[in-house]
Amino acid sequence: MLLLAACGSPPALPLTGAGPTPKAVATPKPDLVARLDDLPQGVVRLHLDPATRRVVAHVDAQGLVPATAHAVQLRRGTCLQRGGVLVTAFADALSGSSGLLNADVRATSSTGGAIPAGVHLELYLTAAALLGAQATPLACADIAADSPTAAVGLYPTPGFRPYGTASLVYRAASASASIGVALQELVGSSVHAVQILAGPCAAPGALLHAAGDVVADAGGVVSTTQVVGGLSAAPPRSGWIVVVRYGPTSAIGTAAKPSPQAQPILCGTLAPPA
C-alpha cells in the first residue's frame, strides 16, 4: 500500500501588537516672522540733455550695497526679452552710504538726439569696468514707447526674482534662536549669506547676527533652519530685518568694505505673527 504524507500549512505565527502610537512632536510657534521681498527696487526716468542732446537717466533705487558703483545700459527689447542690441551705456551709478541710489547718469554715446522706442534700462551688480560679457542685470526697467520720459518702475530682472519667508523661535535656555528660512526661485545650487540687521529694509543698519549660509537645491529652493547664538534677551518685536545676500559669507567682504557679492537680494521685517 502506498502511503501519502499530507502536506499541511505551517503553523500561524502569533500576531504582535502594533505598539504604542508615537507622540507627535509639537512644532514651536514662531515668535517673529518675515515675508522676504526682492531687491533692489526703485524708479527710472529718462530725459534728453538740452545742451548735448544725449540721454540722461535718473535712477532712484533702494536696497543696494552702500557706496558701490553700478553699470547702467539702455538696450533694445524688454525686460522679459533681454539680449537686444546695446543702444548706449551710461556713466556708472553710485549708491550712497545707506545703500540708496539717487543719481543722474549720462549716456556715453549719442542716440541721435532722441530717446529710441522699444528699449529697456538695465542696472548691473558691478561697475562697467568689471562687467562680463554675459553678465545678468541686477534690475531692469521697461521704457514706455509712447511716453519715454515718464517715470517707470525698476525691479529685479525677470527670471531672477526669488521670494520666501523667514521665522524666528527664541530659546531662552540656550540664549539662541532658530531661524527658519524658506526660499524659492533662486539660481540652482547657489549659496547665500543670511543675516539679521537693524532695520528697516529701505535703509539697513548694523549687522546684529550672522545666520550662516544657505544652499539652494538644483531647483533653486531652500528649506532649512539656521541657529544663531548669543541672544541674552528675547528679540524685540520690531526693528530687526532678515537679509539674504547675493553671495556666500566668504565673498561679501566686511561692513566697512563690502564687495558686490554683499548685494541684498531679499529682505523682510521680523514682526510677531498675525
Image: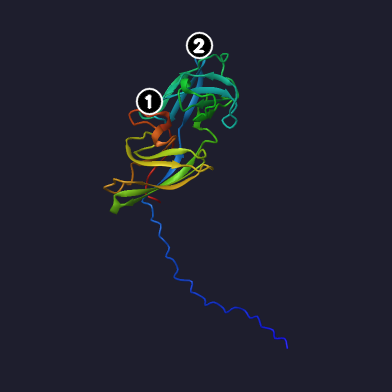
Name the quadrant containing residue 25: bottom left
Residues marked 2 and 1 touching at CB (< 8 Å): no
Name the quadrant containing residue 194: top left
The residue under label 1 is which amino acid type? Ala
Residue 63 visible here:
no
Question: Between 180 and 143, which is closer to the camera in this rendering?
Answer: 180
Q: Residue furthest right?
A: 1
At horizontal 28% and vertical 54% (from top left) the residue drawn is 173
Q: Position of residue 107 (x, y in %)?
A: 50, 17
Q: Is residue 206 above or below residue 45?
A: below
Disc number at residue 52?
Answer: 2
In the rendered structure, the answer to whether residue 91 lies left or right of residue 85 reads: left
Disc 1 marks which residue?
A: 67
Q: Quadrant of the N terminus?
A: bottom right
The residue under label 2 is which amino acid type? Thr
> Which of the marked residues, 2 or 1, is nearer the chain's N terminus?
2
In the rendered structure, the answer to whether residue 252 lies left or right of residue 46 reads: left
Q: Is residue 161 above or below residue 104?
A: below
Question: Between 131 and 8, which is closer to the camera in this rendering?
Answer: 8
Residue 26 visible here:
yes
Q: Look at discs 2 and 1 and give the one toward the viewer.
A: 1
Q: Residue furthest bottom?
A: 1
Name the quadrant containing residue 251: top left
The number of callouts visible is 2
Q: Position of residue 249 (x, y in %)?
A: 39, 36
C-alpha separation, residue under disc 2 versus residue under disc 1: 28 Å
Q: Position of residue 76 (x, y in %)?
A: 59, 24
Q: Residue furthest left?
A: 232
